[in-house]
Image (cartoon, rainbow, N blue to C red):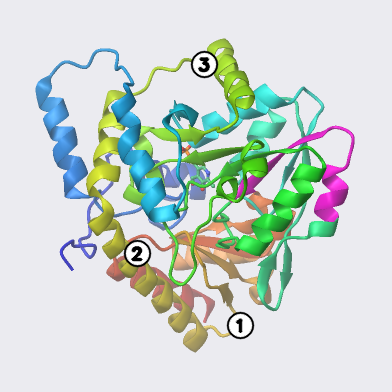
Amino acid sequence: MIYNFDELIDRKNTDSVKWNGLKELYGRDDVIPMWVADMDFKSPPQIIKALKERADHGIFGYPMVDENYFDPFIIWIKKRHSWEIDKSWIVPADGVVDALKIAILAYSKPGDNVVIQSPVYYPFYNIIKANGRMILKNPLKLNKNGYEMDFEDLDAKLNMNRTKLLILCNPHNPVGRVWKKEELERLSEVCLKRDIIILSDEIHSDLVYSPNKHLPISSLSQDIQKKVLSFYAPSKTFNLPGLHASFVVIPDDKLRNEYKNMIKSVSTDSLNIFGMTSAKAAYENGEEWLNELLEYLMNNIKFVLKFFSENMPDLKIIEPEGTYLMWMDFRKYGDESTVKDILINKAKVGLEEGSIFGEEGNGFFRMNIACPKELLKKACESIYKAFK
Ligand SMILES: Cc1ncc(COP(=O)(O)O)c(C=O)c1O
C-alpha cells in the first residue's frame, strides 16, 4: 500500500463533530466515536496539496463556477459508474442534504407525501417534516437474504393522491445495500407508472465492494432519466464533508429549471472555494487512493464480522455491499436503551441507535468502521468485554 490508513490521528480540538461533540451526545467524552459518517483517515495527499496551493494564493474572493469545473466529475462518473453525463445537466450544491431540501421544495407542496425506505438516513425525516411535507414510509423488508424493497407496498404508497416524491438511498445508509439492476428497474417502473420524481441520493456510490457494482438509476433508460435527480459528492469518498461541495445531476430541462428557480428563492448558488478546489483534485487525482481505501475498509469489515461471529455469535451483523457503515442486530442482548447504556457506559463505544433511522431500526446499532484498525480492534474488544 502507498497510503497509510493505520496512522492514528488526534482529532480532538479540530472542531470535529465526531470527536468533540461526545459529551453532548453521549453524556461523557471518553467514548470511542464510531457514529457520524466521516472517516478518521487523512484525505488523499493530492487534495491536501491542492488546498495548500489555493490557500497560499491568499485571495479568497467569490468563486466562479466555469465549465471546466465539471469535467473531472463527469469523467469520474463515466469511469466509475459507466454513466455519461452532459455538462448542462449538472447543478453544483453545497451539500447533499441541502440540495435534497431544495428539491423537496421545488417539486412538492406542503401536505404532499414524500416516500422514504426506512430504516434510513435520519436527516431525510427532518427535511420532509420541517418543510411541512408528510413522511410516507415504504419500509424495507428484512428476510434471510438481508434487506429488500417491498414493491407491493411501494406501489400502494406511490398511488396515494398526494405522493409526489421518493427519496432513494443508493447505496443505502444504514443497511448497506447496493441496489441491483433488477431492483432499480422495478422501482423505475412503479415510479414511472405513478408519475413520481425520484431523488436519488448516491453520496456513498464510490464506496462499494466488489463484486457489487453501483448503478445510477438515472442511467437505466431515457424515460426514467426524465424523472430523476441524482445527488453526488466527493465528501464521503475522500473524507471532505467539512468542505461542502456536491453535485446534482438533472437531465430533464423542466425539472432542472424548477430546481434552479427554487435555489434563487431560498438559497444562493455561491460555492466555497476550498470545496471546489477539493472536488476538482479529488476527481482528478484521487482514484489510486480510493482503491486502497476500499481494500482497507473491506479488511476492517471482515475483521468485525469475524471478531463478533467468534466472540458474540448472537450479534447478527449485516455485511455491507457498500458504505463504511455496519448495521448490527443487538436484539438478543436486550432492549435498545439497555444495550445503549452498556455500549456507552461500560464499553465506552459510541454507536448510533437504530431507532433514529426509523422504528424499523429498533434494537439495531450502526457502527462506522472507517478508522485505523487499531482503534477498531479496541472498540470491538471493549464491546465484547462489556457484554461478557
Ligand atoms: C445518505 C446520505 N446522504 C447525505 C449525507 C450528507 O450529505 P451532505 O454532508 O453533503 O449534506 C450523508 C452523510 O452521512 C448520507 O449518509
Dot 1 beta carbon under 8 Å from ligand 1: no
* Residue 16 visible, this angle: no
Q: Residue at x 27, y 36 (%)?
A: 280
> What residue is shown with label 2?
294
The answer to which of marks 3 and 2 sits earlier in the sequence is 3
Q: Quadrant of residue 122?
A: top right
Q: Secondary structure at mark 3?
A: loop
Could you say which disc has been placed on residue 267 in the image?
3
Q: Residues within 10 Å of mark 3 (few under 14, many from 20)?
A: few
| Residue most extreme to the front | 222
Q: Residues within 10 Å of mark 1 (few under 14, many from 20)?
A: some
Q: Secondary structure at mark 2?
A: helix
Q: Nearer the viewer, residue 269 or 141?
A: 269
Residue 330, percent from left and from top: 62, 71
Give yes or no for residue 149 being in the magenta stretch. Answer: no
In this rendering, the label closer to the viewer, 1 or 2: 2
> What residue is shown with label 1?
314
Q: For the magenta stretch, what is the residue range?
A: 153-169
Q: Residue at x 42, y 72 (%)?
A: 301
Q: Residue at x 35, y 53 (%)?
A: 39
The answer to which of marks 3 and 1 sits earlier in the sequence is 3
Inspect the image, locate mark 2, and give the three-letter code of the amino acid beneath it.
Leu
Inspect the image, locate mark 1, and give the three-letter code of the amino acid beneath it.
Asp
Residue 228, percent from left and from top: 62, 39
Q: Quadrant of residue 342?
A: bottom right
